[in-house]
Structures are given as C-alpha cells and as structure tokens.
Image (cartoon, rainbow, N blue to C red):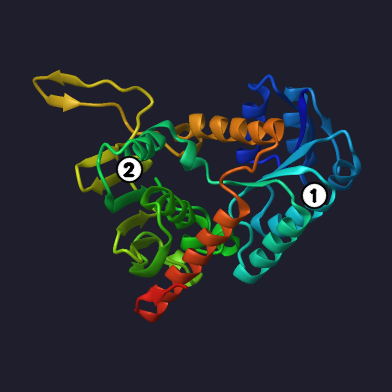
Amino acid sequence: MVTKIALLGAGRIGKVHAKAIAADRRARLVAVADAVTAAAEAIAEACDARVMTIGEIEADTSIDAVIICTPTNTHSDLIERFAKAGKAIFCEKPVDLDVERAKACADVVKSLGARVMLGFNRRFDPHFLAVREAIDDGRIGDVEMVTIVSRDPGPPPADYIKVSGGLFRDMTIHDFDMARFLLGEEITSVSGTASVLVNPEIGALGDFDSASLVLATASGKQCVISNSRRASYGYDQRIEVHGSLGSASAENQRAVSIEIANKDGYTRPPLHDFFMTRYTAAYAAEIAAFIDSIENDTDPSPSIEDGLKALTLADAALRAVKEQKTITLG
C-alpha cells in the first residue's frame, strides 16, 4: 500500500516536506494546496501531483493523510476539519497561538480518535537522538541538568513577528519540547528574563529577541535555555545533558566536518546557515515516522498533547518574563 498524502501550504517548509515524501517509496504526494497558486503549481509539477483546493482534498476519500504547513492561525481549524474527514494529520508547530483553542482542538482529536502528529523535528535529529539514546542506555546515569542553546542567524522580518505569536511560541517552543524529551519528566516551574538586544523594531511590536529561561521538574531536575535572534557565526544549535555518571552533548553541525591546521592556527568551515540545511535529516526522519504510524496503525509521536504541553510552557515563560516571577505549573 502506498500512502497518498496532500500538502497544505507550499512555502519553504512545505517544500522540505514534499522532498521528504518524494524520497520515501511508501508514500506519494498526490495533491498540493496553497493560497498562492504559483507556489502550489511548482511543487505539484516537481512531484507529479495535482493542485487542489483544501475543500477538494477534504472530500477526496482516496487521500490518506495531510501535512499542514499553513500559517499558524489556521492550524487548529484544519486539524479539526481533517480529523473529521478521517485523514491522518501531520501539522507543523504550534497547534494554535491560544492555549484554550489548542485544548479544544486536542479534545476534538481525542473524541474522534484521530491520528495527529506535531512537527517537533528536533526529536528526530540524529545527533540529538543519540544523546537521548545515551540517556536511555544509562551511560550518563540519572539526568540532572540540561542545557539548550538555540540561536538563529538573524531575526525574521517585522511582518512575520506580527503573526508569529512571539519568541516563546514561535522559536523557544522547539526548546520546550526538547527539554521535556531530554529531562524525561514534566516541567513544573518556569522562570527567566528576556530583552530586546537585536532589533528595536521587535520590541516595538511587543516581542523579545533574546531570552534566558530556567525550567525545573518536581524532582528538581533543571533545564537552562538560551535563545537569541542573532548569531553572527551561523545557526547555533547545541545541547548538553549532565547526569549522575557523566554527560552527553551534541555540538553544532557544519555542512563539511573538517578542520585545517596551519601557521595561522586551526580553522573549521562555517555552521549551517539555518534550519532547512541543519535539520534536513530530521525532517526526512519525522515524515518517515509519520508514514510508519499510518502503515502500522500506531499512535504518532510527538502527539498533539506534546504540542499542547509545549504551548503551555511558552505561555508560562511569557508570564514569567513579564511578571518577573517563577510560574508554577500544575
């Protein structure tokens, strides 16, 4: 059986997922929908798919699954719509910008028994996954402290900031999910500080571009997250897990992993320039995992509940920063 998939949203992440589907023999991209017809046509032509409307995709019973890469404010409505249509759903994060709306969406998914996977691709990065495997294998003992560094090479345009939901719901949400993934326990408190150090226009829009957060679990495990919208040296993505018997870390990745030594010293190639090249393998692996869940009739992971928990942490972080106090979660 070949899983027939439709793509909703033909932007840059849509292109990444289309490529991942094309590389998997178990699936075929059969339809593409986008408000910009030319964008949909470009992917459809490259993948031998059809350009269809969202309504046509919804009504087509031959289509098994959809991948949602549309703007965030459409996610919850589309998840509910395609859950009712009986299709498997992969949706980019977040579920919604509003926690209550996300909760309502998760309730609909649960009531229908729909298969929904959230796009937290970093869980599938081979380097980060190797750190998790070291934890599971007991090689570093009990996890005690996690450090996550996540810094973009540059800030997004103002028009994006306006609709992004802010730094914590847009960028740090990946780190909240990774913190849960590595700590192995639910986070019960959030504290931190945030400021505008990169672009004053971001502050004028009511957002932050630099943040440091401290998360803790009920047992006392800790996670420190460092975020910035500017890293002049490239896309900075690092994690370290400190345990009772040692530590495991994943360093920054480069397009070419070499080091040159001469009279001028030691030099290495630059880091990846952004997420589309840094996480290529992760994007392919998460789509493969989504197809696995359809083929094997299993619950996908990360789930919509994982998405809801990450969004709840994003809201808690925003409160912690604005109120300058530790926010305790139930």
Vertical relation: 54 (above or below) 211: above
Left or right of residue 57: residue 95? left
- Structural crowding at the residue carrying mark 1, measured as other residues with C-alpha within 10 Å and reported as few (<14), some (14–19) or many (≥20): many
Q: Residue 186 bears which disc, if any? A: none
Q: Position of residue 252 (x, y in %)?
A: 32, 36
Q: Which residue is mark 1?
A: 82
The front one of 10 and 183 is 183
The front one of 158 and 122 is 122
Q: Is residue 230 visible?
A: no
Q: Position of residue 91 (x, y in %)?
A: 65, 47
The reply to whether the C-beta atoms of the residues labelled 2 and 1 are less than 8 Å apart is no
Dot 2: element: strand
**Residue drawn at 56 percent across, 46 percent down:** 302
Q: Position of residue 62 (x, y in %)?
A: 87, 33
Q: Which residue is mark 2?
A: 238
- Identified by mark 2, the residue type is Arg
Q: Position of residue 229 (x, y in %)?
A: 40, 54
Left or right of residue 316: residue 1? right
Image-quadrant location for residue 195: bottom left
- Structural crowding at the residue carrying mark 2, measured as other residues with C-alpha within 10 Å and reported as few (<14), some (14–19) or many (≥20): some
Image-quadrant location for residue 77: bottom right
Vertical relation: 172 (above or below) 51: below
Vertical relation: 30 (above or below) 156: above
**Residue drawn at 70 percent across, 22 percent down:** 26
The front one of 7 and 285 is 285
